[in-house]
Image (tube, rainbow, N blue to C red):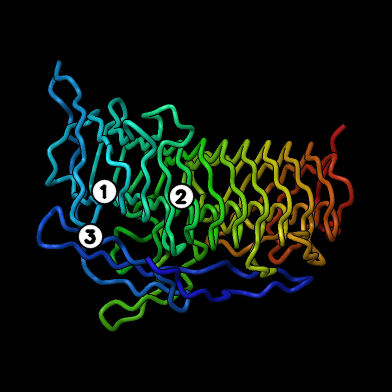
Amino acid sequence: MSPPNLKKPYVYIRFKPFIDLFHLMKRTIVIGAMASLVTWCACQKANDQTPATPGKPSTPSTPVTPPSGVKHKRIYLKQGGDKGFYSNGKDFSYEAGDTLVLKENDWSYCSFENFYGTKSDPLVIVNEAAQIRLSAGFAFSSCKYIKLTGSGTSDKYGFLISDAVKGGVGVDIHGHSSNIEVERIDITRKTYGYWVKQEGSCVDSLQYPNFTISDIHIHDGRIHNVTQEGMYLGSTDPNGTRAVNCSGSVIYPRPLRLGNITVNNMIIDSTNRSGIQLSGADQGTNEIYSNTVSNSGFEYNTAQGNGISLGGYTHANVHDNSINHSFALGILVLGAGKIDIENNTVDNSGNLNGKVTPGMASIMVDTRRTDPVVKSTLIIKNNKLGSNTDKNVRFYETFATYNTDNQICNSGTLVIPGDIKYTTCN
């Protein structure tokens, strides 16, 4: 997979930062006539838009529940001639609770569509005998109740995803997907570590508010040396301002939103853009905690390269993370609703690899347009904020949508517009 054509989607302005974020990607999936011969997804970015293909997505299958008393099976996946695996769950013999096993050491890709476990019997995908290496990675399209785990051997990371040309996505979760857990995966030399998102589509069921990508848990893994975001979770165009061409008609669909997203115990180091980016997560409980994020922003673009970013509509609890050396901000908050930023250690914001970027706070907060209007309450407390090139905490107010019950405590030097109400802690 070739690296995407990179473009700068927006420009950071010193005192009025950041209009809506980032970019989209084009995906092409070509499946050969034989089920064992499949071509991997080719991902590329084009003018920060995704020309969608009109039509209906394949209908998700019904979860296959084993009859009472039936023992779960271990099913060994077989590579095709391209050293990859693709299957649609409708055409694959399995039952909820079964375990799908990768045993050969070297794979190109492993792609699943319409695979379902159940809440009580998730479908497990695991390594066996040794650490399994993949060049392209894993993709899940319209899958539910899946656990991808590298716990099949004593290796800390049972799957290693690495690409010699630094292209593509390590783990891609999209479409009508939910209830997916991913653990013990090592990702390096890719464009992105993780994608969890579905961009604007011509298909109604893939447009907000017709489905929510929810209950995604990513933990105990590592991402290092990737050419864009370590974790790209949710579309950065939640209001649907990007055009999509549907059989000659241009529409502006709103992408699917996210809910109940959890990221914890991840090690993320040396990304060209931000370490963790979560956007459009307006449902349920979203939590980013106990992660180590270092050396973010080797693209040396002031509009990118934050340690952790919360995009439009996102409410989340960001706590107990360590963020060190970001070309841009340590933590950027552009979300809405109740947002907790607590017990994080942030140091060397605006200082990466000997390059110093003026005006980079440890924590920066601003507001974005939401439809309907969603007001924000910020709780920022008990953070250990070290070196930066601005202030410890800086607030902006692009839209006057702050509530009056904000709490900002133990944060050192602050810059907050006078009409933003907040209290300090005892």
Q: Residue at x 33, y 47 (%)?
A: 177
Of badges 1 and 2, nearer the viewer stands 1
Residue receiving disc 2 = 258
Q: Amino acid at mark 1?
A: Phe
Q: Residue at x 66, y 53 (%)?
A: 307
Crowding near pointer 3: few (<14 within 10 Å), some, many (20+)? Answer: some
Crowding near pointer 1: few (<14 within 10 Å), some, many (20+)? Answer: some
Q: CA distance from mark 3 to mark 2?
A: 19 Å
Horizontal side of 139 relative to 413 (left or right) equals left
Residue at the extreme top: 69
Query: Circle 2 sits in a helix, a strand or a loop, which is it?
Result: strand
Q: Quadrant of residue 365?
A: bottom right
Q: Position of residue 263 (x, y in %)?
A: 53, 41
Label number found at residue 57: 3
Q: Amino acid at mark 3?
A: Pro
- Is the C-beta separation of discs 1 and 2 under 8 Å? no
Horizontal side of 174 relative to 336 (left or right) equals left
Q: Position of residue 183 (x, y in %)?
A: 45, 36
Residue receiving disc 1 = 112
The disc, 3 or 2, on the residue closer to the chain's N-terminal end is 3
Q: CA distance from mark 3 to mark 1?
A: 14 Å
The disc, 3 or 1, on the residue closer to the chain's N-terminal end is 3
Q: Amino acid at mark 2?
A: Leu
Q: CA distance from mark 1 to mark 2?
A: 20 Å
